[in-house]
Amino acid sequence: MNLPHVEIPGPEGILVITPARFADARGFFSESYSRAVFQQIGVPCEFVQDNHSLSRQRGTVRGLHFQLAPFAQAKLVRVLRGSIYDVAVDIRRDSSTFGRHIAVDLSAENGRQLFVPAGFAHGFCTLEPDTEVLYKVDVPYSRDHERGVRWNDLVLGIAWPVTGREAVLNDRDRQLPLIGNLDDDS
């Protein structure tokens, strides 16, 4: 069994996972997910749903999103085409790393994946046009439990690869609250 390469960049629970690739003249083969292997490397989830997004323009920002308990989601994020600047922000109020974030470049080429445990807001910015992202979640989507944090909140200190003028966002994400204004139930 070939275990994927795992980085633990912090905050607690975040993992950057690079599955092994076996290349030859035809291309490559990679086992992108195996429940047994991922449990062995510290991903305790049983995923129940896959989500797939296509962003047509470079600079598209999606997020920072999360769901409230009992629908809080862990995610396993990977890129099928293109590349993203992927961000997870610790929003666990009792955590010593509350408000801290991790940012990592994920691409179809590098094959890296980001495991984001429940209790984090997640979002990304596309670095190339026509970028496709696939992410697994361990709890189904619930509109009533969906929340978010504004992507460019200065308190978070995220070095996004686009400015506010360049970012392609939907109205909902543009109007998300700052982390200091999250409700007590967030």
Image (cartoon, rainbow, N blue to C red):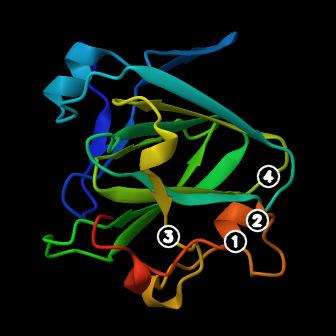
- Tell me, for residue 171, which label it has, or none: 2
Q: Is residue 104 above or below residue 178?
A: above
For the residue pair 134 and 3, the one nearer the viewer reads as 134
Tell me the kind of residue under disc 2: Asp
Please say if the residues under marks 4 and 1 sit with CB atoms less than 8 Å apart: no
Query: Quadrant of the image for the C terminus?
Result: bottom left
In this rendering, does residue 93 appear at all? yes
Is label 1 in a helix, a strand or a loop?
Answer: helix
Is label 3 in a helix, a strand or a loop?
Answer: loop
For the residue pair 71 and 125, the one nearer the viewer reads as 71
Is label 2 in a helix, a strand or a loop?
Answer: helix
Tell me the kind of residue under disc 4: Glu
Please say if the residues under marks 2 and 1 sit with CB atoms less than 8 Å apart: yes
Q: Is residue 118 above or below residue 49?
A: below
Q: Earlier in the sequence, mark 4 or mark 2?
A: 4
Check disc 4: other Cα within 10 Å, few if <14, some if 14-19, many if 20+: some
Q: CA distance from mark 4 to mark 2?
A: 22 Å
Tell me the kind of residue under disc 3: Val
Q: Which of pointers 4 and 2 indicates the residue nearer the eye?
A: 2
Badge 1 is on which residue?
174
Query: Is 33 placed left or right of 80 in the picture?
Result: left
Query: Is 182 placed left or right of 135 in the picture?
Result: left
Badge 4 is on which residue?
128
Residue that protrudes farthest toward the bottom in the picture: 154
Badge 3 is on which residue?
149
